[in-house]
Amino acid sequence: MNIDTRIKFRHLVCFLEVARQRSFAKAADALAVSQPAISKTLKELEEILAASLFERGRSGVTLTAAGVDFMRYAGPCVQALRDGVNVLRGGAHEAGLVRVGVLSTVESLLIPEVVRRLHERHAALVVSVATGPSAFLLAQLRVGELDLVVGRMTDSPEIQGLTFEHLYSESMTLVVRPGHPLLARAPADLERLGDYPLVLPLAGTTIRKYADSLFVQCGVAQPRQRLETISVALSRRYVLCSDALWVAPLDAVRLDLRQGELMELDLGIREPGGSVGICSNAALTPPPAALRFCEVLREVAAEYREGALP
């Protein structure tokens, strides 16, 4: 069956942007067009396909079952064309390019080592890294704007329909600056945890529930003073210049703990953690650079599991 020639590139781009933004208004801003133009373009596409692609609700728009099915093909189609244009225009055919979404749980230790080894072994390789919450990165992966996402994300609803490969399990820990008052006793006085500001992952992120679980296990309420962020750099700097407590992924602070720049607060317990791994989109054909990235990532993760890193 021939492709309906009425379907234009603008239809696909508009559809994907609305699916990503979950809002007509935000999609219009992203594409620098008016909201009526977005509505008109989508209506044209739905008429051509003889299917409703979105459901409108108070909280925005969501994909219908037909929309989910169509996105499996529209995303890779658009991205493949973009990649082809970029390769020829930018000379990227002379080098490899892998686009990776990286969660805060792995950006401090695992990914730098992976990139270091890749650059040692490949003379021409570009690793493009995007950071952010798991829901955002998985949405980018779903529409073909990322090749892989690495981190702890198995509890995110956005992972449905994607492929996840487990690498290792990672726990959470509570860290403070050297000289913090709570370090005077081991295990720490749990009743005093609420006296200090707390640094937590953003509400709604995959690792937040593990951070919350640590306080539940301690049987104490979280302090009213909190900094909620997924930025490792901001969390680290704030803890070093204050008496704040940081519920951190062990990966994010392992080097700091080893070098004595941060101290682990002994609670007598440790939250067991979740699965860190690679998420990919089976509907997309991964570029060679992505396969090389995964190969080295598995190698580094295996060494991490065996205690050979850092």
Image (tube, rainbow, N blue to C red):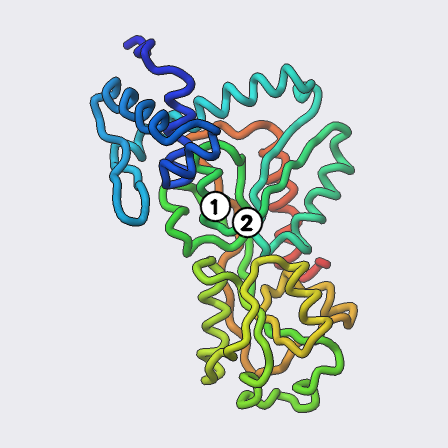
> 49 above or below 71?
above
Q: Is residue 172 left or right of residue 40?
A: right
Q: Residues within 10 Å of mark 1 (few under 14, many from 20)?
A: some
For the residue labelled by badge 2, is the local secondary structure a helix, a strand or a loop? Answer: loop
Q: Position of residue 218 (x, y in %)?
A: 49, 83
Q: Amino acid at mark 2?
A: Gly
Residue visible at 64% across and 61% down in the picture: 252
Query: What label sits on residue 32 in the rendered view?
Result: none
Q: Position of residue 79 (x, y in %)?
A: 49, 25
Q: Quadrant of residue 263?
A: bottom right
Is 31 placed above or below 309 here?
above
Contact, mark 2 vs mark 1 (Cβ under 8 Å): yes
Does the rendering let one see residue 282? no
Q: Which residue type does callout 1 highlight?
A: Phe
Distance in Å between CA atoms under marks 2 and 1: 7 Å
Q: Percent x, y for residue 154? A: 44, 53
Q: Which residue is mark 1?
A: 136
Q: Residue at x 32, y 11 (%)?
A: 6
Identify the residue position indicated by label 2 in the image.
Answer: 132
Quarter of the C terminus within the rendering: bottom right
